[in-house]
Amino acid sequence: MLKPLATLSLVFLAACLPGGEPSASQPVPTEAELARIWRLERLNGQTFAERATLDLTDPARATGQAPCNRWFAAREGQLPAFRFGMFGATRMACPALEAESRYLAAMAEVDAASLRDGRLILTGPDGLKLEFLPQTP
């Protein structure tokens, strides 16, 4: 009887923890800090092997390179809220279309941004997490 009660207590405590809210370890980024080109490193904790970028040098829109195609979208929200409006993309085929679909589907679900240890962290519902590093020339 004690084991199920202990498990239920842990579940309850986990449900009380804050979600995607920024904390001291996840400060709200400024537009100046975001204004660069970022390279996707991890998607939901897994290394993203294909090339994917996010260009945030324009505060009103985002552009980037998915594994196969260039894409663009309006930026919406007041930081730390961070969303993309209507997406558009070129339509070229390549062997990495499945990886591209995962990347663009994840980007469409993003609802918050934070910076941690020089990384841009985009998050969304159900634990969605994209980790970007600044792109180097």
Image (tube, helix red, strand yellow):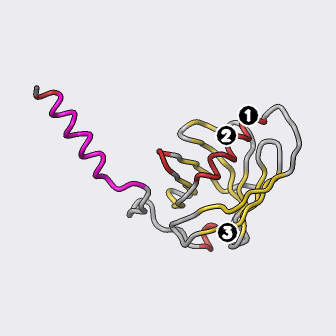
SS class, disc 1: helix
Q: Would you name the residue on which mark 2 appears?
A: 102
Work out whether mark 3 precedes mark 2 in sequence or the reverse, and give the earlier one.
3
Which quarter of the figure has residue 83?
bottom right
Q: Residue at x 73, y 34 (%)?
A: 98
Asked if the residues shown at circle 1 and circle 2 are in contact, with their CB atoms under 8 angstroms apart, the answer is: yes
Which amino acid, mark 3? Ala
**Which residue bears the numbered disc 1?**
98
Q: Earlier in the sequence, mark 3 or mark 1?
A: 3
Q: Position of residue 72 (x, y in %)?
A: 77, 59
CB within 8 Å, label 3 to label 1? no
Query: In terms of secondary structure, where does tag 3 sit?
Result: loop
Amino acid type at mark 2: Arg
Residue at the location (62% across, 66% down)? 34
Is residue 123 toward the left or the right of residue 8 in the image? right
Asked which secondary structure carries label 2, the reply is: helix
> In the image, is 86 to the left or to the right of 106?
right
Q: Does the magenta segment cover residue 95? A: no
User: For mark 3, what is the residue?
Assistant: 35
Q: Residues within 10 Å of mark 2 (few under 14, many from 20)?
A: few
Q: Residue at x 66, y 48 (%)?
A: 40
Q: Which residues are magenta?
A: 4-19
Residue at horizontal 64%, vertical 52%? 108
Choose mark 3 or mark 1, whichever is in front.
1
- Relative placement, left or right, of 108 versus 12 is right
Question: The disc labelled 1 sits on which kind of residue?
Answer: Glu
Is 98 rendered above or below residue 126? above
In this view, 76 is above or below 3: below
